[in-house]
Image: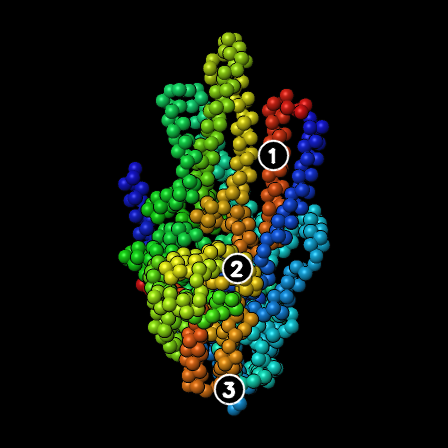
Amino acid sequence: MARFIASRLVSLILSLVVASVAIFVVIELVPGDPAGFMLGLNATPEAIAALRAEMGLTDGPLARYLTWTGGMLTGDFGTSYTYKVPVADLVAARLWVSLPLTAYALALSTLIAVPVGLLAASRRGRPADFAVMGATQLGIAVPNFWFAMLLVLVFAITWRVFPSGGFPGWEDGLWPGLRALTLPAVALALPQASILARVMRSALIETLGQDYIRTARAKGLSQGQSVRRHALRNALIPVMTILGLQFSFLLAGAIIIENVFFLPGLGRLIFQGITQRDLIVVESVVMLLVFAVILVTFLVDVAYALVDPRLRRA
Amino acid sequence: MFTRISTSAAVLALMAGSALAQQTDITIGMVLEPPNLDPTGGAAAAIDEVVYANVFEGLTRYTQDGSIAPALAQSWEVSEDGTVYTFMLRDGVSFHDGSAMTAEDVVFTLDRARAEDSTNAQKALFAGIETVEAVDDSTVRVTLSGPDGAFPVKMAWGDAVIVAPESAETNATNPVGTGPFRFSDWVQGDRVELVRNDDYWGEPAALTEATFKFIADPTAAFAAMMAEDVDAFPNFPAPETMAQFETDARFKLILGSTEGETILSMNNKTDTLSDIRVRQAISHAINRQDIIDGAMFGFGTPIGTHFAPHHPDYVDLTGQSAYDPERAVQLLEEAGASDLTLSLKLPPPTYARRGGEIIAAQLREVGIDTEIENLEWAQWLETVFRGKDFDLTIVSHTEPLDINIYARPEYYFQYDNPEFQALMADIEAETDAAARSEMYRQAQRTIADDYVNGYLFQLAKTGVANARIEGMWENAPTQANDLTGVRWTE
């Protein structure tokens, strides 16, 4: 197990180094000057030059790469060009929205998907299975921003039970925050739940056809017991893979939903950073996300090994 | 179940209604979030839309109708030759941190804005200043290098607000001004909160709290207004839904004009477009009303020159470049310009993207092909504005009284007319109002006669607000949401 973790750690670190170089080079190549953007149409060239110097943009690329990566190692992610506050603070504030939202959406999607997948797999070929397959097909096909707008129309404009968007912050208490995140979480969870339920169903059906399940049944276990004791555990591997992917997707990929509900999440931070050429924010946040994705993949790998002892030797 | 939910919703709405009777807080929707809150260190309109007249004040200020009123200077005198301005400051004004606002702060502000390492986005406003001195605690004398009749107007800009030396460096994140509201909180990406300044020198504001909420998505903006999560949206991003708000008794429309001359800019230095006949042909090929109807849902006033129609000195020159495709074809023939293909580079705003499609179709009618390229703002600034690598582009010039950009030969559309440049220099120096007006009229005619750009329309201000709010600005003489006079009725 220790060797397994060590080998995974090495590849984690290598991936981070490669990613940091790639991100820096891409951002370097993007046209557009942050200082020029900030000062607008009437700015004098001297004012722009003064601002560039203030931002530290006059150094060479290598020096800036080293400052950037060196800073990150010590936990200093630089200062946003436009907001003029430390990037770490910006990200931390956004994470208070993005992490709960992601967790909320994942919890909802798992709560829906696991029982639904179980139901469909155990009623394979019967009406319940067809209903689940049809509904999940629809869930995948419906664009989530459209579904989000529908939710707003019904729950915010017509019934007024949830706000139409925005985020009050957690300092006002748990309930106002959860209330603000409910519609976005539902909008995000529905397509994810549909995918997850289908994966759950096919994984279960596959394991249920395995010899060991037949053996278990032959030993006298009921269908339900054999699913709980043997099939479920084996079917969890593909489900966890999907969950890991969904976590990283939702963390930054919720940008469209963040726009529909005007939530101050990570996705919008990157989007704003790109349009305003707040390059340091873009670099650092993308790097953090890469780190998060790699870390999640690493944790999922470890979790596989915990669930399936055969993988520990790999 | 359904009836129960809707009854309880109705009860909730009723309760909310009675609680709102004494409402003194307001939530204002804005499309763009300000990058920082220091109007002296950035050009973004969103900065002024939050802090101008609310948190920060200048020596003078814009009022709703575009005229200039005294602000921190209660009066001023100008010397005979128009080069020395003496500002008499108001007494008893203090910054939000409690320190007194004195002549020293004014000297500091103006010297900082014109300093070598200044990052003021409108540094040109201060270029004419030679010296600034504090005569006593409440008198400031500004000596200019030449006469400038418009100096009090320049001091009304958001970029010229008075800041204190102690807080100037941190205004970006914690603005400290002298205005009727003080900064309270900024949740980046979501909202800025202001609270009333109870020590304000002037009449205190009726509102006790103001929240600016940032909603970029037009559909979300619509939903937020409809759900009454936002009380007013002064620059509403979904003009196509205005009719719906008009018929809803809960809301009212706030329609007015802005300082935004929206123009089809032409690169006057390219081989084809340096020929005035080609530029004139393009101007005649454009049907302004089609663009206003098609791209702006009917909101906007046609213009025939680079000047705001609501300005008293405006001359209506739309007839000179009236829609006349036959004349356009004829002019192109005279110029020997056949099979023209021009680049049309469009920045992100709707007026440009939608307007660009319509203009491309109209130009095709007279035999000019366009290659449309959509750019982000940062790209547009780099390639079009600074790189001057374009034939045509569409942009709204939102600074007030900015016809003087035509006197800058290096400006992106590269119009170089020494006569016009001399005229602008004369206007700067002229202190007699009537003479200035006449010169402004002349300037408008000159750029119309030279068909420098295609003049499209004046950008409208299309706002929506709760019907019980009064005192919001209808027009936008400068980009601001002045909340000083805003109150809830009932």
Could you say which disc has been placed on residue A53 in the image? none
Badge 2 is on which residue?
A: B380
For discs 3 and 1, the disc positioned in front in the rendered view:
1
Gap between marks 3 and 1 measured at Cα: 71 Å
Q: Residues within 10 Å of mark 2 (few under 14, many from 20)?
A: many
Considering only vertical position in the picture, is A136 above or below B355?
Answer: above
* Amino acid on which disc 1 is placed: Thr
Tell me which amino acid carries mark 3: Glu
Tags 3 and 2 both on a single chain: yes
* Whole-percent x, y for residue B233 in the image: 40, 59
Mark 1, residue position:
A297
Q: Which residue occupies 41% across, 58% down?
A: B360
SS at circle 2: helix
Let me know if residue B156 appears in the view: no
Q: Element at badge 3? A: strand
Q: Residues within 10 Å of mark 3 (few under 14, many from 20)?
A: few
Mark seen at residue B77 = 3
